Amino acid sequence: MSDHNVHKAGFTTSGIQKDSLASKMMSQEAKSSGGGVLSGGPTATLQEKGATCSTHSSGFTTSGISAGSKAAEMMSGESKSHGGETPRGGTTATCQSI
């Protein structure tokens, strides 16, 4: 995952860009959660990474998640809370796909 792709999707140091993939994602997540964007959810996580330009250094790479990284910790925690699988559309999967 490159910081360039995160910014291109609309997650920037200034916030989420209007009419971007990020704004559509935020809107969809807010609707599905009853009106708010969850802390630790895909939108919040990607915005944090976009604001700090830290996606690659967190362990999200073009060849997959780096062993022993923050991304690996995220994937492990999410997997444990979902019965041993990383859910499609979850935070880890969304971050890695971008």
Image: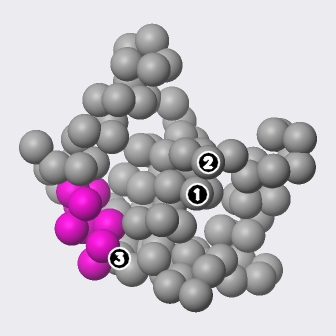
Horizontal and vertical percent position of residue 11: 27, 57
- Residue 7 in magenta? yes
Residue 27 lies, with reference to residue 9, above or below; the image says above
Is residue 26 in view? yes
Q: Is residue 78 left or right of residue 3?
A: right
Disc 1 or 2, which lies upstream in sequence? 2
Per the image, is 87 magenta? no
Q: Are marks 1 and 2 in contact (CB under 8 Å)?
A: yes
Residue at coordinates 41% horizontally, 30% vertically from top-left?
Answer: 29
On screen, residue 58 above or below 75 = below
Within 10 Å of disc 2 (Cα), the crowding (few <14, some 14-19, many 20+) is: few
Read off the residue under disc 2.
88
- Label 1 – label 2 distance at C-alpha: 6 Å
Earlier-in-chain disc, 2 versus 3: 3
Q: Please indicate whether residue 55 sits to the left or right of residue 51 in the image.
A: right
Looking at this view, is 66 or 51 the one in front? Answer: 66
Query: According to the image, label 1 marks what residue?
Result: 93
Mark whose residue sits in front, 2 or 3: 2
Q: Are marks 2 and 3 in contact (CB under 8 Å)?
A: no
As shown in the figure, which amino acid type bears the numbered disc 1? Answer: Ala
Looking at the image, which residue is at 65% across and 77% down?
65
* SS of the residue under disc 3: helix
Question: What are the residue bounds of the magenta stretch?
Answer: 4-12
What residue occupies the far top of the structure in this picture?
34
Q: Which residue: 81% across, 59% down?
A: 76
Q: Which callout, 1 or 2, points to the residue nearer the camera? A: 2
Q: In terms of depth relative to the viewer, which is nearer, 63 or 60?
A: 63
Check disc 2 and report its element: helix, strand or loop. Answer: loop
Depth-wise, is mark 3 or mark 1 nearer the camera?
1
